[in-house]
Amino acid sequence: MKKKVLSKRSLFFSKIVWFVIFLTVIFFLIFKLFQTYSPTTVQETESLKPIENISQEKIIPGIPIRIKIDSLDIDASLESVGLTSEGAIEVPKELIDAAWYNLGPRPGEVGVSIIDGHSGWKNGTQSVFDNLYRIEKGDRIYIEDEKGTITTFIVQDFKIYNVKDDVSTIFSSSDDKAHLNLITCVIGQSVNQTIFNDRFIVFADMEE
């Protein structure tokens, strides 16, 4: 009789133990499931997305306001210019200023940025690019924008173009890189007067 009672009690307690184990497993699974999809976890995951997006965004250069070429002692303000009524790039109003062509890329953007300036002005009046012809390959050109950011370009080449030459290629590129071209006049002499038909152009690439 006692054995039967003990057997029933053992069976009863065994069922209770297994029931407790079953409940423990169920609660554990529910807890893990809730933790995985809790608002805090989702919020933390979402908060990482803007950081990833920011790191992938391209930084857009500001409007250029200054040009410096230490090797030539050039440190000048940049005016913003467009096209003349004849379709030519405008020149800066001030002789000591250079001018950025605002219908093209900003220095530092993909493509070719253009900056022009006067040189060899009459009566020995100082102009911004008087000494540009002395530039050498490897010289650095620094462009400061309105945000105070400085973009560095390295001179790759330079060339003189006649007024009749096709210079369309100096305004575009297809290599997805940032370039900077500087343009100024070249002094020449006709029979009775000084002429400025030729153009001296400097080709520079953004420093990587």
Image (cartoon, helix red, strand yellow):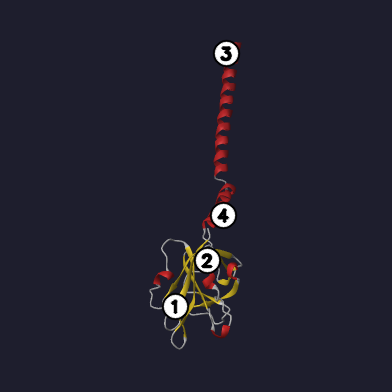
Check whether the beta carbons of the residues at disc 2 and disc 4 lie within 8 A of each other.
no
User: Which callout, 3 or 2, points to the residue nearer the camera?
Assistant: 2
Q: Residue at x 54, y 40 (%)?
A: 33
Left or right of 54? Residue 162 is left
- Of pointers 4 and 1, the one earlier in the residue sequence: 4
- Rounded to the nearest angstrom, the CA distance separating label 4 from label 1 is 51 Å
- Of pointers 3 and 2, the one earlier in the residue sequence: 3
Dot 2 crowding, Cα within 10 Å, few <14, some 14–19, many 20+: some
Where's the N terminus, which quadrant?
Answer: top right
- Of pointers 1 and 3, the one earlier in the residue sequence: 3
- Rounded to the nearest angstrom, the CA distance separating label 2 from label 1 is 19 Å
Dot 1 crowding, Cα within 10 Å, few <14, some 14–19, many 20+: some
Question: What percent of the width, then of the height, locates residue 16?
Answer: 58, 25
- Rounded to the nearest angstrom, the CA distance separating label 1 from label 3 is 118 Å
Vertically, is 43 above or below 174?
A: above
Residue 67 numbered tag: none
| Residue bearing the label numbered 1 | 198
Residue 136 numbered tag: 2
User: Which callout, 4 or 1, points to the residue nearer the camera?
Assistant: 1
Residue 4 numbered tag: 3
Check whether the beta carbons of the residues at disc 2 and disc 1 lie within 8 A of each other.
no
